[in-house]
Image (spheres, rainbow, N blue to C red):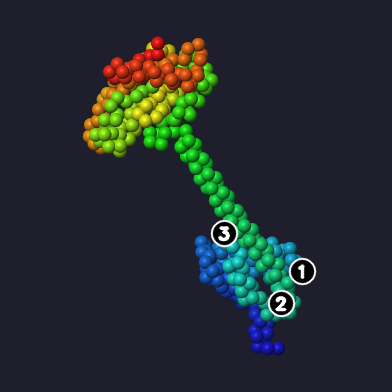
């Protein structure tokens, strides 16, 4: 009998416990070297020692229990996110903890170590797969969100004026013919700026664009919730609203007053006025093109009469 066998034969429970503890500590040390951070050293050590003790207690063929032990060890250590780096440390610990004698204990240890490591690796692999799936789901959700945002931007670009952010002609025409339950006819206020060309010639197109944006904001403030405020083209704007002709006239008078107030732009105080044409649908006839054309003709009457006034279609 060799000296090693003699020492192992004479070894008592205290020596065995020391061997298991040393193997557990080596396992955790190797895990740390592989990148795993142990949040509670004492708890992790005791969990590993209990795993090794469980293998010691398996003296007969019992692979299912060995697999349960291995799975419990992996489950008890949170954050082991991949099997490729963290299986090796356990195999090393099992070699350190393996009994030297007697022969039947050595054989039993070897039979149970394999299933335990396999189950341990499977738990880690499943955890890694779950993490990858979560990452994939998050990536898919982020991509869907970006696609939705892009679709919203494309839709907005297709339905709104790029400079002022107001609705464009297509939206205006749809709004006019849209069935609605409100009582009252649809009225169109077509607003054309007086002297806008002179602003562009004097201050440049950049200031002209600033003026258009500022006018659009004042028109938004005049409009009621549910009205359609549209940049119809160039320096022409349209407010489409539901209500009697008197309401449209009141809105037109307010627009004239609001636009006549000076605009504070990068070039300083800029003054502008407007001419407004009003057309109101009659007998429920909401032909968009006809209504806008009627408002346009009324606007030209107002402009040819000196501007800074409104005219309603006769």
Q: Residue visible at 77% across and 69% down?
A: 61
Residue 106: assigned label: 2
Q: CA distance from mark 1 to mark 3?
A: 30 Å
Q: Is residue 138 above or below residue 76?
A: above
Q: Earlier in the sequence, mark 3 or mark 2?
A: 3
Secondary structure under tag 3 reads loop
Secondary structure under tag 2 reads helix
Secondary structure under tag 1 reads loop
**Image coords of residue 202 (percent x, y):** 24, 34
Q: Residue visible at 38% across and 14% down?
A: 312
Q: Earlier in the sequence, mark 1 or mark 3?
A: 1
> Which residue position holds label 3?
78
Instruction: Say which of marks 1 and 3 sits in front.
Output: 3
Disc 2 residue crowd, few under 14, some 14–19, many 20+, Cα 10 Å:
some
**Image coords of residue 218 (percent x, y):** 33, 27
Confirm whether residue 254 shows in the render.
no
User: Could you tell whether 87 is left or right of 147 in the image?
Assistant: right
Q: Residue visible at 66% across and 67% down?
A: 117
Q: CA distance from mark 3 to mark 2?
A: 31 Å
> Which residue position holds label 1?
61
User: Could you tell whether 274 is left or right of 23 in the image?
Assistant: left
């Amino acid at each position: 009998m060799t000296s090693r066998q003699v020492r192992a034969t004479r070894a008592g429970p205290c020596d065995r416990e020391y061997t298991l503890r040393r193997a557990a500590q080596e396992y955790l040390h190797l895990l740390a070297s592989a990148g795993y951070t142990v949040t509670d050293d004492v708890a992790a050590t005791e969990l590993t020692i209990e795993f090794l003790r469980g293998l010691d207690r398996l003296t007969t063929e019992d692979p299912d229990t060995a697999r349960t032990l291995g799975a419990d060890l992996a489950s008890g250590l949170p954050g082991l996110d991949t099997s490729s780096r963290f299986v090796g440390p356990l195999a090393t610990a099992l070699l350190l903890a393996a009994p030297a004698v007697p022969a039947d204990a050595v054989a039993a240890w070897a039979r149970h170590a394999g299933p335990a490591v396999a189950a341990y690796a499977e738990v880690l692999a499943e955890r890694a797969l779950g993490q990858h799936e979560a990452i994939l789901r998050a990536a898919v959700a982020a991509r869907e969100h970006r696609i939705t945002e892009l679709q919203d931007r494309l839709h907005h670009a297709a339905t709104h004026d790029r400079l002022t952010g107001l609705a464009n002609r297509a939206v205006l025409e749809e709004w006019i013919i849209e069935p609605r339950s409100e009582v009252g006819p649809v009225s169109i206020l077509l607003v054309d700026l007086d002297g806008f060309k002179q602003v562009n010639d004097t201050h440049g197109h950049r200031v002209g664009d600033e003026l258009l944006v500022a006018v659009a904001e004042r028109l938004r403030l005049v409009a009621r919730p549910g009205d359609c405020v549209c940049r119809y083209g160039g320096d022409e704007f349209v407010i489409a609203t539901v209500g009697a002709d008197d309401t449209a006239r009141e809105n037109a008078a307010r627009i004239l007053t609001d636009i006549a107030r000076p605009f504070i732009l990068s070039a300083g105080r800029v003054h502008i006025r407007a001419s407004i044409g009003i057309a109101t649908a009659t007998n429920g006839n909401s032909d968009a093109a006809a209504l806008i054309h009627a408002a346009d003709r009324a606007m030209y009457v107002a402009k040819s009469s000196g501007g800074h006034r409104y005219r309603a279609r006769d």
